């Protein structure tokens, strides 16, 4: 499974994509593995152990918080993404 990182999250991680070679049952498990492999992301993504309100977590293009949240099941081949708010002018 692969994580795509956008905007400043990609800059913080030093890459736009992170492939995980781990057995994960849920999006939360995959997020834990991602943050373990890229510890600089943790303070930007989490607040007191919870995903910050303004960070969108997507599985195959769908926001997981419209359904089961971090308990959303994942399978090999799923594309996960972290999307911070983006503003422009």
Image: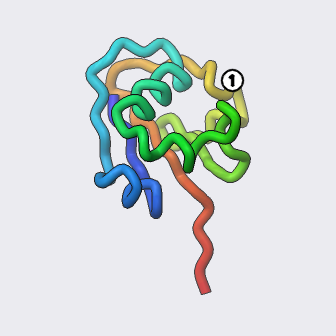
Q: Position of residue 41 (x, y in %)?
A: 47, 45
Instruction: Report whether 21 appears left or right of 23.
Output: left
Q: Position of residue 26 (x, y in %)?
A: 52, 18
Name the residue nearer the viewer: 62 or 11. 11
- Render colour scheme: rainbow
Mark 1, other Cα within 10 Å: few <14 / some 14–19 / many ≥20: few
Instruction: Report whether 61 appears left or right of 48.
Output: left
Q: Residue at x 53, y 52 (%)?
A: 83
Instruction: Report whether 39 appears left or right of 65.
Output: left
Q: Residue at x 70, y 28 (%)?
A: 67
Location of residue 7 with respect to 60 vertically, above or below = below
Q: Quadrant of the C terminus?
A: bottom right
Name the residue nearer the viewer: 63 or 28. 28
Name the residue nearer the viewer: 50 or 57. 50
Q: How many marks?
A: 1
Location of residue 40 with respect to 79 vertically, above or below = below
Instruction: Report whether 67 appears left or right of 2.
Output: right
Q: Residue at x 42, y 15 (%)?
A: 24
Residue at disc 1, secondary structure: loop
Q: Position of residue 6 (x, y in %)?
A: 44, 57
Q: Give the residue number, with chain letter if any, for mark 1.
A: 68
Q: Residue at x 48, y 25 (%)?
A: 32
Location of residue 7 with respect to 1 vertically, above or below = below
Q: Quadrant of the N terminus?
A: top left
């Amino acid at each position: 499974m692969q994580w795509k990182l956008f905007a400043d999250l990609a800059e913080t991680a030093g890459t736009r994509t992170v492939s995980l070679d781990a057995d994960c049952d849920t999006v939360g498990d995959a997020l834990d593995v991602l943050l373990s492999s890229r510890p600089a992301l943790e303070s930007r993504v989490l607040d007191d152990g919870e995903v910050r309100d303004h960070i969108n977590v997507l599985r195959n293009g769908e926001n997981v918080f419209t359904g089961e949240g971090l308990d959303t099941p994942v399978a090999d081949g799923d594309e996960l993404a972290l999307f911070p708010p983006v503003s422009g002018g």
